[in-house]
Image (spheres, coloured by chain):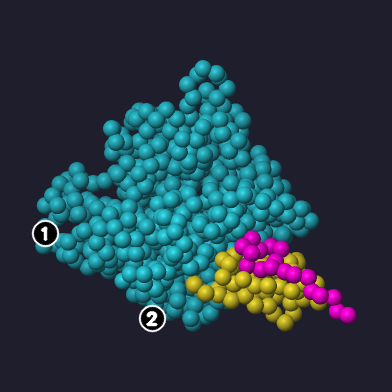
Amino acid sequence: MGNYNIHVATERCTGCLRCELACSDLYTKVFNPSVAMIRVTVSDADWDISFTDECNDCGVCVDHCFYDALEKSEKEQEK
Amino acid sequence: MTIGGFAGNVLYVDLTHGKIRREPLDPALAEKFIGGFGLTVKLAYDTIKPGTDALSPDNPIILGTGALVGTNLPSTSRVYAITKLPTSNTIGWCGAGGVTFGCLFKNAGYDHMVIEGRSHRPVYLDINDDRVEIRDAGSLWGKGVDDTSEALWEEFGRPKGIMTIGQAGENLVPFSMAFIDRIATLGRGGLGAVMGSKNLKAIIVTGTNGIRVSDRKGYKKLSKAFFQTIREYRYLKEWQELGLVNSFPMIPKDTYMRMKKRRIACISCPIGCKDVIRIPDGEFKGLVKCSSSVINLYTPVIYGFKDYRESIKCMATIDQYGLDMFEFFGVMGFAKALGDEGVIAGDLMEPEILMDSLQSMETWAGKISKREGLGHVLAGGFKGILEEFGEEAEKYAPALIKGMHPYAGPGSALPWDLFGTMELGQVLDPRGPHVGSGGSPTYFAKRPLEVFPRHLRRMGVPEEAIERILPGLNSPGQEQEIMVGRLLRYSHTWFTTLGSLGICARAAINRFYNASLCAQFYETVTGIKTDLPELRKRVDRVWTLLRMANVREGLDRTDETPPEKWFGDHGFKDYASEKLLTREDSEQMIGDYYEEWGWDRKTGIPTQDILRELDL
């Protein structure tokens, strides 16, 4: 698993899908939203951001969000 | 195909015979014409037979996306369509922020699509990777843009990119548009009517193939620095918050914030400029409207509406029908003048045309879109009205260029009075009066000329051309002037550069790009060796070929005559001196524009020398 907790502020999301592009590029070496482990489900006025079971919380999606719709915080170390 | 960036295929759809085929994209052609807008021009030149009627089955529609579309480079989502346009009767481009459409089209495996023929019944095209089907659109025909989009999303879910027309396109109104994802417009010129003439209601697309970058290491390095530049832009949050309200303060910011529900960005864009708003109070409280910008929703205010909420409601109706708002209001203003002067009989004017009335404008939008009563005549646009009412009507006609109403300038919706590249560009873009391709620093009024060279270098203008554009810049004491015609040549170059790569041309985002960086990104993504001089040459080839496509149609300098209403006491002013513009000034600029391209100064026809030089 990755080192981050991912926090979502859906109301700031614009549906630009930069997160999906970044995720797919990192793990498959192609830009392909259909295989991204973060899913932005868009409708006209309301939408949802979720993660697939395979997501390992690496936080690359956060790094590529320009709208502060995603933020990350380090996970507490397990003792 | 081994080059990166491109999906690698061209999709051919023959609606007459219901046949679909895909062909590999020719890498040599992709290199020669860049891709996106550029390769769309090439396919249009090769496919559109000279003299084709815009609304006949023989007129193909060519769609294209750029090599960078589908990557995460900022604002690389553009979609272009080129066809013979019914309003201007020229081969012209329509372009839109692709929202999800461009990226999903590429992911389905296609860079371009050529749509030919005419279906014998209403259909829509369903593209899902290799599976491409022509489906019955009987249940969609007669629906508006929003309703069609909603129905398709409800049936097929998301993500699905949707391009659709409303009732105006179905009924061949020459000022009808196509919409992407119900927000972005492929507008002005009549693409909606061309789709309608083919009985093509919509295109839906999704795909799972992905876009590969040729030089990943180089891409990472270049893009990382580029992203950082945008992150550090001090006005980034302001633009994200306000969008175009930031540069068009016609809407009070507190009013905007009260109705703002969400910003929408095209895929990969860090400065999303599209709006979802919700009317906060009044009779239409709760009405939710998407738009390519909230600014557009205020267009009826420009024409006299007093209540912004009624303005938004009116635009919701106009967009549903799929009408071009500027042309609609221009036509209505003309019809009202003809009614007032008795040229149109009073009993035909039912309801009365009131430019500031929601009820009147909504009713007329419907009558035009469905061709009911006098609406049938008005649906013919200025050309149709002039044909119907003849010479008597002519003296009341507004300024017209290539059969369309310019939307910037004296007597137009946007009453800009300084004559910069966007204003002149309304005459010299083959598609007719549109400002989209004419961007330059003159976009901002009264900018000191000292700041121009930096921007021109960013646009890729060669040094010797900068001296021609700004002849007095390095000569103290000499009157400062700007050669707008020569500069417009490079506006079109810059537009072609951005469009061919798939980058949005809006000022808020293209400010971060420069021509050298475009060449670097293109080379890194595609693997096609490209430096700035080579990119310039390919770009020149593209715009010159578009010119040739229209010369072949019979376009000549008389079609590019500035309207008389642009001159006089209330006419345009020179950008630098602010003296009133004369016809002679404008003719000089047009000659300069042609000459700067290497076209014949008098006729605007590309010379044999330049055609040879560009390998055309």
Q: Is residue B348 visible?
A: yes
Residue in view at x 43 percent, y 51 percent: B249
| B548 w.r.t. B569: above or below | below
Segment tinted magenta in the rendering: A61-79
Colour in which the image shows chain A: yellow
Colour in which the image shows chain B: cyan
Read off the chain for label 1. B
Read off the chain for label 2. B
Q: How many marks?
A: 2
Callout 2: few (<14), some (14-19), or many (20+) C-alpha neighbours within 10 Å? few
| 2 vs 1, front mark | 1
Q: Amino acid at mark 2?
A: Ser
Q: Toward which corner of the image does residue B22 lie, by quadrant?
A: bottom right
Return the residue nearer the eye: B192 or B602.
B192
Q: Which residue is mark 2?
A: B139
Q: Earlier in the sequence, mark 2 or mark 1?
A: 2
Q: Amino acid at mark 1?
A: Gly
| B514 w.r.t. B255: above or below | above
Return the residue nearer the eye: B391 or B279.
B279
Q: Which residue is mark 1?
A: B346
Q: Position of residue B477 (x, y in %)?
A: 51, 17
